[in-house]
Image (cartoon, rainbow, N blue to C red):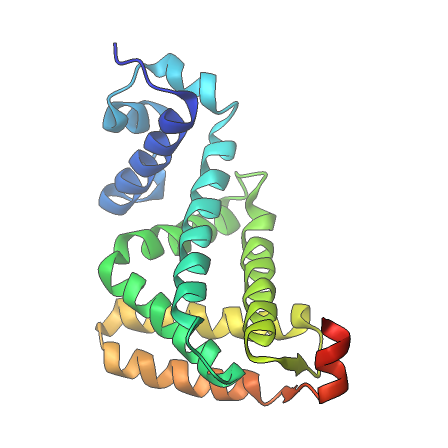
Amino acid sequence: MRRIPPQQRREELVAAAIRVMAQRGVPAATTRAIVAEADMPLGAFSYIFGTQDELMHAVIETVTEQERFAAQAGSIAATSVEAAIRNGLNAYIDLLVAHPERELVSLELGLFAARHRTMKETPTQWETYFSSGAQMLQYAADLTRTRWTAPTAELARPLVAFIDGITLAWLADRDTDAARRTAAFAAASIASHSRPLRTQEVRDAH
């Protein structure tokens, strides 16, 4: 049997769960199917994850963190908050195009759980998205010396709604240019709730 550090084993189980769900759907992601895909013994699952709910929550966190990292990396060179959001959304679209199976799994997981109410962690899935969206908006503001005129927690909800819409539409028609146009519209809409920091506000921030 392979000797694998616990963190690596955790990552491999998460990756295996994503592959199983991408290929066969969420209902097929049984514990046995996941450990078989990961080439691990059944006992390895319970050693790393107490329940399947914990694994599914780890899948959500992993996908969300990858999205946030990509969006932040894409925003670095922006000189306005609108450009930062647009660049971040375009970086997300790049990730979507490169790995559509991960986004499909994320959406299916939330819809499956909402229908069956089988995952105790499910109510936190969109809360995770909202929290990540609020962090991205604050990052964009800090990057471009901008102040939001509404709480980031409120603005994160339409941002996440735009992202969900972009994802669903792209998965349906694979029209990347249309997805980028929607991203530009979303960035302009969200950025309309911001204003540049005044000189004194910039000094106070430092």
Rendered view: 147 above or below 13: below
Percent position (x, y) of residue 39?
24, 22
Q: Position of residue 44 (x, y in %)?
A: 38, 16
Q: Quadrant of residue 168?
A: bottom left
**x 43%, y 42%: residue:** 59
Q: Would you place residue 44 above or below residue 33 in this image?
A: above
Q: Is residue 142 above or below residue 47?
A: below
Residue drawn at x 34%, y 86% is 181
x and y percentages locating residue 84 in the rendered image: 47, 77
Question: Is 39 left or right of 150, judged from the image as shown?
Answer: left
Say which residue appears at 30% left-offset and 61% top-offset.
95
The image shows a total of numbered marks equal to: 0
Percent x, y of residue 87:
39, 76
Decide which of 160, 10 is in the foreground and name it: 10
Q: State which quarter of the image contains the N terminus.
A: top left
Q: Residue furthest top?
A: 1
Q: In the displayed structure, would residue 38 be above or below residue 27?
A: above
Residue visible at 63% across and 86% down in the picture: 193
- Residue 6 falls in which quadrant of the image? top left
Locate the C terminus by quadrant: bottom right
Is 36 placed left or right of 205 in the picture?
left
